[in-house]
Image (tube, helix red, strand yellow):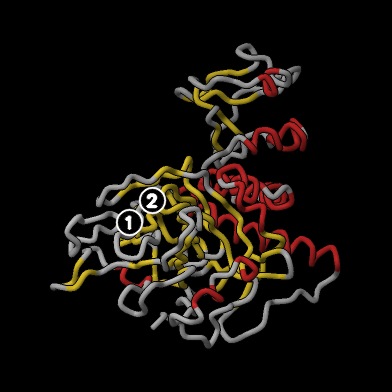
Amino acid sequence: MRSRVVAEGTVCLTSSAIVPATLQATFHFPHSARVWRGDEIWLQPSGIEADPPEQGRGMDFLECVGPDTSAIVFRLLDDPADLARASAVSRSWRRFVVENQFSKIQCLRAYPEVANFMDIEICSPGSSVSRNVRSSAAAEFDKLERDHRVYMHLTHGLLSPYNTKDCIIHCVGASSTDRYPEEAIENTLEAADRLGWNPSYWSSRGHRDPAVAECLMYRLQTDLCLVDEIKMRPFKAFFRDDEPIYSAERIRFQMGYPKSPPWSGTTIYGENEGQLIADSNYIWTYTSPEFPMLQENVLQSFKLPHPVLCIGGVVKIELLGGVVKDAFDGLYYICVSHVQIVGMPLSGKLAVAPRGSSVVLGYYSTPRKSRVPHSE
């Protein structure tokens, strides 16, 4: 059902709306719902006789039907703009919206990953987190109103239409590299599989066991990104007579945030990149299903079952199983020429900060630049 809020303080539905059972139990449809303005159905509680609202006046929906039924109707609002209009009707409506955390409910309904946030902090560059010094009751409402504003900002980003783009800002590291820097992970950011006469790709070390998994890890442009799909092109060794394609058998993705910045003050190079990508350094909030990978030198698309909110801006690509045994040394390698993580970066005003085993959503008054140094 589609519902909306009008300025008079009355909730209305379109006449084509399908009324759910929860509302049918409270409102007698269609007898108690009168078409008063065009195609709008104005909700009139059962057992209450009311005349159409006069111009500039309207019944107070919250007082008329009570908080429980009002909450049912407000939860049906799926557009952040409708919720913003509702909170602007009056002080009592704003308090009702804020205290019931409807903006957070909208976020959770669209992206359950939002449940990972244990708290919200309002920050400003170079200063500490803002604190309340008012009485406990006033401070509690101030906190709820602060959270409401941040969740409204987040919901607007999550639910607005967007054009997808490659969200990678730089590499974090690889589980192994055969020849560094010639076959480093940074080569996977290049769209072409050769630069001039030189091949451009990442290669794992060789393994006797084809089941050994490898992984590549990337940092996205902002702490919060919507991810729709991952694209990858296996490398074809065009300089070999048989031109083998060193693809993986399967692929899987994880998204999350670092427990603490493991790259702080650290330059990524061949000997230490495995330490930077260790699972013990990260909290993973999403793990995708496994996808089969084709042994073809094309940009293959691995579309997620639904867009995922990447909390923390770190994506790990797991390459599960080698399929090609090298003709020279008899070892299995996985080689990748190009990677894209496709979606949309959210506002740079939103940040993610670990707090013990949980994570906090931070909000800055001005967008921040990524503080993660580019690997060299």
Q: Identify which amino acid the numbered label 2 is placed on.
A: Val
Q: Is residue 349 left or right of residue 24?
A: left
Q: Residue at x 32, y 56 (%)?
A: 246
Q: Check disc 2 and report the residue beneath it.
A: 323
Q: Is residue 245 above or below residue 188?
A: above
* SS at mark 2 in the image: loop
Question: Residue 40 appears at what percent x and percent y?
Answer: 50, 25
Q: CA distance from mark 2 to mark 1?
A: 7 Å
User: If the image is split into quadrants, where does the C terminus sit?
Assistant: bottom left
Q: Check disc 1 and report the residue beneath it.
A: 246
Question: Residue 26 appears at what percent x and percent y?
Answer: 73, 21
Q: Is residue 29 left or right of residue 243?
A: right
Q: Identify which amino acid the numbered label 1 is placed on.
A: Tyr
View extreme (left): residue? 196
Question: Residue 247 appears at what percent x and percent y?
Answer: 35, 53
Is there a contact, CB below 8 Å, between mark 2 and mark 1? yes
Q: Quadrant of residue 122?
A: bottom right
Q: Residue at x 81, y 73 (%)?
A: 134
Q: Is residue 364 above or below residue 23?
A: below
